Image (cartoon, rainbow, N blue to C red):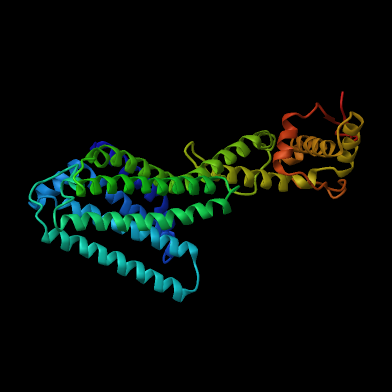
Amino acid sequence: MSSSFWIVAAALGIGLAYKLPAFLRGGRNPLARQVAGLLLAACGVFFFAAPTTIAWVNDATGIPNLAAPLVYSLLTGFCASCLLLIVKWRGGSSESVRRTTWLVYGSYGAVIVALWVCFALSDHRVERLRDLDTYYANTPGMREMILLYLLGHTVAVLITSALLWTWESRVRGTGWLHAGVVLLSVGYALNLVYDAVKLIAVVARWTGHNLDWLSTNVAPPVAAVVGLLIALGFIVPHGGERMSRNVSDRREYRALGPLARALSQVPSAGSPIPIGPFTAPGLRLVHRRTTIRDALRQLQPHLDQSARERAVQTYLAEGKTPDEAEVLAEAAAIVAAASTPAVLAGKAPKQSARAAADLNSDLVSLSRALRNLPVVRWNSTTQESVTP
């Protein structure tokens, strides 16, 4: 039982770790602070709600069931964080946001104080690790404490869930962000299931019935699923975008390989930058792009415009489209220029050289053209392109 709570706490901790850099960079960004606070509170709830942690808190303090108001206070703080996040997301005038923020702080702060007052005034001598809500459902003080945390949680979840489902239609088509909002929406909706089964079990005790199994056997798994969905809701948009960006960077890095190899002998104007096997894909891509562009700048004066135009006509005659012929001619010009002695020696072209050609194609198109380039002989004397 405890391991499931710790797994959820760890998942929420991962979500917090994902958001922590944005929080540290954001400085006074209220949204970053609110998300970090929400995830921290949720992580605390699941960590301290584990039965073994409950037993440890009770033993360490010497007060039976002290973990109960501690967990309920953390859960109430989580509810307040959810509402405050909604307030920040919704926006509005600074005065309205400030007023609503203080209302949330005041109301949920009062609930936390009331939880501890009710606990202090109650008889809670019998330690209960799993069924405290139903065992003390009819005990004065404890009864009010249990009802307070459940009602506070239900109100916060209702508001948050309703607004999330409203936003779901607005973010459709945004990819990972939409997936995150859907996960959060489902997670908060399942929170209502948790509250419902808890309240049913407690009310059953009030009416002399026994539905404790709802509280002890149904509510904890629901809470675990809720925690995982909320954690994923915050992790997926950031992690998914990062994964997609890395995949895209790796794909483009590989696509630029033929062009990078074709230009590998062209002297570079800058100093080489060491790239290790564990370098981030984005940095590797930036380095490859920079190296290629630097080599093309060195190569550009050696590209022959008239010869390239003749190559275009040759490819058109072979049935290529105008765009395909243009890219293939540029790729052939690059291969020919990169192998000339002047380029390899790093010499500038002679003043009598033909007009330099401008490259119009993007780097990936040029690289793909090099990969599928038909054999072209670039006659060094006549500057003509010939396909055998």
Quadrant position of residue 32: bottom left
In percent of width and height, residue 325 lies at: 84, 36
Q: How many marks?
A: 0
* 358 left or right, relative to 37: right
In percent of width and height, residue 166 lies at: 52, 55
In percent of width and height, residue 302 lies at: 79, 44
Q: Is residue 99 above or below residue 171?
A: below
In percent of width and height, residue 327 lies at: 80, 38
Residue at x 26% of width, y 63% of height: 111
Quick one: 2 or 14, which is closer to the camera? 2
Q: Residue furthest bottom?
A: 95
Q: Is residue 121 above or below residue 263?
A: below
Residue at x 23% of width, y 48% of height: 202
* 373 left or right, relative to 256: right
Which quarter of the figure is the C terminus placed in?
A: top right
Residue 77 visible (yes or no):
yes
Quick one: 294 or 111, which is closer to the camera? 111
Residue 237 visible (yes or no):
no
Quick one: 143 or 117, which is closer to the camera? 143
Quick one: 99 or 32, which is closer to the camera? 99
Q: Residue furthest top?
A: 388
Which quarter of the figure is the N terminus placed in?
A: top left
Quadrant position of residue 209: top left
* 244 left or right, relative to 54: right
* 304 left or right, relative to 265: right
Q: Residue furthest front?
A: 207
Q: Is residue 242 above or below residue 1?
A: below
Residue at x 41% of width, y 49% of height: 188
